[in-house]
Image (cartoon, coloured by chain):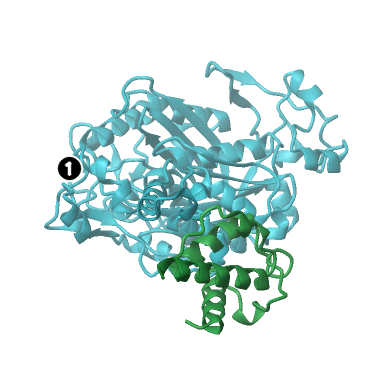
Chain colours: A green, B cyan
Amino acid sequence: MTDRQVIETADKALAEEFELDVERFTPEARFREDLDLDSLDAVDMVVVLEKTFQIKIGRDPAVMQIRTVGDMHRYILAKKQEMEQEQN
Amino acid sequence: MDCPLLDGRDYLKCAPDLAGSQVEISMKGKVLNPKGNFDEDESARKNSGQLPSLAAASEGTAVKHRVAVTGLGIISSLGNDVYTVADALYHCRSGVRIDDERLEKGFLSPLACVITDFAPRFPLSRKQRKTMPLYGEWAAEAVFQALHEAGLTPEDMQNGMSGIIFGNDSSCIAAIEQIQALTETKCTSGIGSGHVFRSMTSCLSMNLNVILGSKGACWTLSGACASGGHAVGQAADLIRLGRQERVICGGAQEINWQSMCSFDGLGAFSSRLEAPEEASRPFDADRDGLVPSGGAAAVMLERYDLARKRGATVYGEVLGYGFSSDGENISVPSAGGLARAMRTALSEAGIRAGDVSYVCAHATSTPVGDAMEAANLVEVFGDIKVPVSSTKSMTGHELWMSGASQVVYTTLMARHGFTAKNRNFYRGDELTSRLNILRERLDSPPTVALCNSAGFGGTNSCLLLSFS
C-alpha cells in the first residue's frame, strides 16, 4: 500500500465512522474545531484505525498529540512503517 | 372549592397523605394569580426548577395544576406510528410471531413480538446512535413523534421547566456487546466509546436529554414491568406540583433474545406454538403464559393551562396517579397491592369507581398474575361491571414499556372513538369471569380510564386518565 493509498484509506474509514464528507479531511482540518469531533470520538478513531490497518495503537502517547488530519496522516504512516520494519 | 386555575373543577378536594388517608388541601391566592401564573420571579424559578413557593409548601399548601396529554409517540409490534397502531388496536391485530433464533438457542418458547420495518421519520446521526442501543433509537423516534404531534420543537424543551422521565429496567444487549468487544480486542481501549453509555439503565434519559437539549428533569425510572407507568405518573406529579411545565415521559424495552433468556427459563412464556396469534390470551381460562415484547412509547405531558394558552390540542388529561407495593413475594403479585394503587388514583382525583368507563389492564396472560389482577379489580369495583381489556392480548407483554404504552393505546382509543377488545378471551376462570372483559370492540371511546401496571417485587402503578 502506497502512502497515498494509506491516507485515502484512513480518510475514508474515518469519514464513514463519523458520517462526514471525505472532502473535509484536508491536512489542515482540525478534528475538534473543524470536524466537531470530541474526546469520545478520539477513542473511536483509534479503534477504527486499528481495525482498518490491523495495527496496535492502544494508549500510545503520540496519539494524544494529534490535532489535525495531517497529524493523523503522519502518525498512521509512521505506524505502518514501524510495523513493516518489525515484520522484516 | 372555587379555583379559577382549575376552571371550576374540583380537583384539589382530596389527596392522599402519607398513610393513604384523605386530607383536605387548600390553595393560597398569594401564590397564584387568577390566570394560573406565579406572582414571584418567574425567570428565577424556571432556571431552578424548584417548588414555586417553599413558604407555601411549609404551611401545608400544595400547589397543583392539571396535566394535559398533548402528544403521543409509539414504536411497537403493532406499528411504528400512531395511525398504524390505532388501526391495529381497532381491528385487534396480533403482533406475536415465532422467532426461529430462540428455538436454536434452546428457549422453552420461541414466541415473541418484534419491531419490523423500523424506518425513523426523525433519523439520528451516527454519533447519536453510538451511545444508545437499538431500543434507544426507538425511544428517540417515539419522543420526536410525540413532540411533533404536540406542535413542539426541541427548542421548546430547552429550559429548566422542561424535562424527560423514562421507564427502563435493563440494557442487557449493550453489556454483552462490550464484553464481546473486549474478548476480541483484548484491550479495553478497543471496546469503543459508546458502550459505557449504552449499557447503563439510564441510557434513555441521558441520550434523549442531549438530543433535545432539555434542561429540567432527566432520569430513568426502574420499577420492573411498572417502570413506564411510574414514569408517566411521576412526570404528571412534577407538573401538578409546579416543578415542571412540560415532561416527555414514557418507556422502552429491548426485544433481543439475550435479554429474555433467563426469563424464558422460568417457564413464564406461552408455549402455544401451533397458533402464535392466540398465545397471548389475558384473563382467558386457557392462558398459559406471556409473550415477551418491547418497543418504545412516549407521552408529552404539559401543564394544562399552558397547553391551552399556546393553542395545543389536548388529547387527554392525567387525573391521578396511584402507586403501591406489595412487600410480599418477588414474583407473585399480592391480593391487595394493585387495589391500593387504584384506590389512590381514584381518590386523588375525586373520581368514584362507578365513573370509570374503561380499565386498560396490566394482565399479561400468566395464570397467577391475571387472577390476582382480577381479584384486585373486584376489590375496587365490586359489582360494577366496568369494561376491561388487556392490550397485551395484541402486543404481548412490553415489560418496562408497558405502563406507558397503555397510556398511548388508551388515548388512541379515545381519540378514534372506540374501546379495544381483549383478543383471545373466550372463557373466564373462577376469578376472571367476575370481570366485564370485552369480547368485542366497543364503538364508543373511553371517557375515564384506569391504566394498571405491576412489576416483579410487587411494585404497582395506576394512572387515571380522562378524555372529554
Residue occupying the point 56% across, 29% down: B348
Depicted A88 relative to depicted B43: above or below:
below
Occupied quadrant, residue B224: top left
Tag 1 subunit: B
Would you say residue A29 is visible in this rendering?
Answer: yes
Residue closest to the eye, B321 or B243: B243
Would you say residue B434 is visible in this rendering?
Answer: no
Residue occupying the point 85% across, 43% down: B43
Residue closest to the eye, B210 or B146: B210
Residue occupying the point 53% across, 58% down: B140
Find numbered disc 1 in the image and state the secondary structure of the residue it sits on.
loop
Q: Position of residue B42 (x, y in %)?
A: 84, 41
> On the picture, is B416 further left or further right than B18?
left
Residue closest to the eye, B384 or B25: B25
Depicted A52 relative to depicted B396: above or below:
below
Three-letter code for the amino acid on which mark 1 is drawn? Asp
Residue to which mark 1 is pinned:
B288
* Mark 1 neighbour class, 10 Å CA radius: few under 14, some 14 to 19, many 20 or more: many
